[in-house]
Image: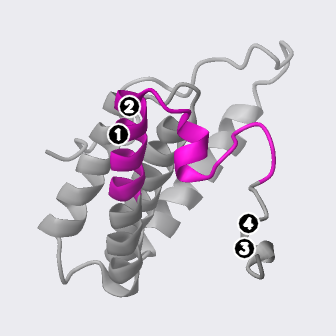
Amino acid sequence: MGRPDVPSGAGPTGPPPDPFDGPDGDGDDDVLAAQVEAMRAELANAPVEVVVANHCYALFELAALHLSQQPPHLPESRLAIDALGCLVDGLEGRLGESESVLKEGRASLQLAWVQIDGAERAGAQVDAVVGVDATSAPPDDDADDGG
């Protein structure tokens, strides 16, 4: 189901008042309405596969965010990973240039999820398993390839 079209002038006359705006902010409604209309026009002219791919990237970021929490939010990250998978698999061949990157991203999220879940089940420190420390910069292990 899509978002129903609302004819101009129907429904609320604008967004709720900004609590940080002074009492004389009446002219801001017209500016905001013009900005919203410009964004709608830009969106209507954008290639749909790009817009859908951007939503997929947002799901990727959502999953990664939940995986990076301490402790990780595994059920939440799993839902975002599964939603990403539904879109990528369900729209195969229709996501344009982003499709291969999205497939690789989903695979890396799935691998990270399995590693984190396994570490938690084994009682290990999750950061040690996936090589990530959420409180500092990533380790420089690759720089020490010489031993």
Mark 4 belongs to which amino acid?
Answer: Asp
Percent across and percent down for residue 137 are 80, 51
> Alpha-carbon distance for marks 1 and 2?
6 Å
Percent across and percent down for residue 133 are 70, 43
Can you tell which mark lies on residue 142?
Answer: 3
* Residue 61 is inside the magenta segment: no
Query: What is the quadrant of residue 135 in the picture?
Result: top right
Q: Which residues are magenta?
A: 109-137
Tag 1 residue: 118
Percent across and percent down for residue 120 are 41, 30
> Alpha-carbon distance for marks 2 and 4?
24 Å
Tag 2 residue: 122
Judge the density around disc 4: few (<14), some (14-19), many (≥20) Cα neighbours within 10 Å.
Answer: few
Which residue is drawn at the image coordinates 28% and 38% (left, top)? Answer: 79
Q: Secondary structure at mark 3?
A: helix
Check contact, mark 1 vs mark 2: CB within 8 A: yes
> Alpha-carbon distance for marks 4 and 3?
4 Å
Which residue is more in the foreground, 89 or 24? 89
Mark 3 belongs to which amino acid?
Answer: Asp
Q: Image height check: is 38 above or below 16?
A: below
Which residue is drawn at the image coordinates 35% and 82% (left, top)? Answer: 100
Check contact, mark 4 vs mark 3: CB within 8 A: yes
Mark 1 belongs to which amino acid?
Answer: Gly
Q: Earlier in the sequence, mark 2 or mark 4?
A: 2
Check contact, mark 4 vs mark 1: CB within 8 A: no
